[in-house]
């Protein structure tokens, strides 16, 4: 009985680690905005690198609306990603004295080619991203 319990515990730890790895690998790459249920932007690109850095740019009619980059961390267990901004565009807005942390709830399509991000600071907003093929 002890061996069975120990085996189940080891399997559960491996499964959690594997899910974290699968989720991180799914994020890595370049994504193009395909849909946003808001009129703020109609184009965008977001890039997640393997070293934990990200960059995002949104535009409307080829004019930049927002752009930022920085470190990111994924919480696979609760399905959210945190963007820690360390650089952001100064256009069209002045640089704030305090840089906000962006938290996005996320979900992937079954084939991991579509990523939906839902910003917690803007309830109801959904950005749908399509992974760029290599």
Image (spheres, rainbow, N blue to C red):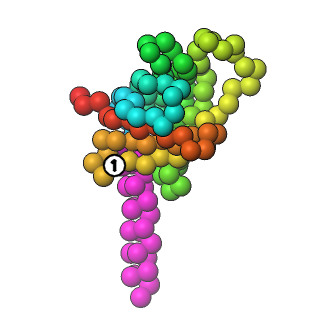
Q: Which quadrant of the figure contains the N terminus?
A: bottom left
With 104 as the anchor, is 47 left or right in this view?
left
Q: Is residue 106 above or below residue 50?
A: below
- Counting other residues with Cα less than 10 Å from the Cα at mark 1, is it few (<14), some (14-19), or many (20 or more)? few
Please indicate whether residue 86 sits to the left or right of residue 72 in the image.
right
The residue furthest front is 39
Q: How many numbered markers are drawn?
A: 1
Residue 39 placement (x, y as % from top left): 51, 28
- Residue at horizontal 61%, vertical 12%? 92
> Among all residues in the image, which is located at the extreme right?
97
Nearest the eye: 34 or 73: 34
User: Which residue is rendered at x = 45% and y = 72% of the image?
Assistant: 9
Q: Is residue 66 above or below residue 9?
A: above
By secondary structure, the bulk of the magenta-drawn segment is best described as: helix
Along the viewing direction, whichever of 3 and 16 lies nearer the viewer: 16
Q: Is residue 113 above or below residue 50?
A: below
Which residue corresponds to the image point at 49% horizontal and 12% vertical from the top-left? 63
Q: From the viewer's perspective, is 46 left or right of 110?
A: right
Q: Is residue 81 visible?
A: no
Q: Residue lying furthest left in this view?
A: 134
- In the rendered image, is residue 112 in sight? yes
Mark 1 highlights which residue? 109
Q: Residue 19 lies in what quarter of the image?
A: bottom left
Closer to the camera, 21 or 60?
Answer: 60
| Residue displayed at 32% across by 45% down | 112
- Residue 106 image offset from top left, x and y in percent: 47, 46
Q: Secondary structure at mark 1?
A: loop
Residue 13 is inside the magenta segment: yes
Magenta highlight range? 1-26
């Amino acid at each position: 009985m002890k061996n069975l319990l120990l085996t189940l515990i080891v399997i559960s730890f491996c499964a959690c680690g594997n899910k974290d790895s699968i989720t991180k690998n799914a994020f890595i790459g370049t994504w193009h905005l395909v849909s946003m249920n808001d009129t703020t932007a109609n184009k965008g690109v977001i890039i997640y690198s393997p070293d934990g850095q990200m960059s995002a740019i949104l535009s409307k009619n080829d004019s930049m609306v927002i752009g930022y980059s920085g470190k990111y961390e994924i919480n696979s267990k609760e399905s959210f990603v945190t963007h820690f901004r360390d650089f952001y565009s100064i256009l069209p807005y002045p640089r704030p004295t305090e840089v906000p942390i962006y938290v996005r709830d996320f979900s992937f399509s079954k084939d991991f080619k579509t990523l939906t991000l839902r910003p917690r600071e803007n309830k109801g907003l959904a950005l749908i991203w399509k992974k760029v093929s290599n």
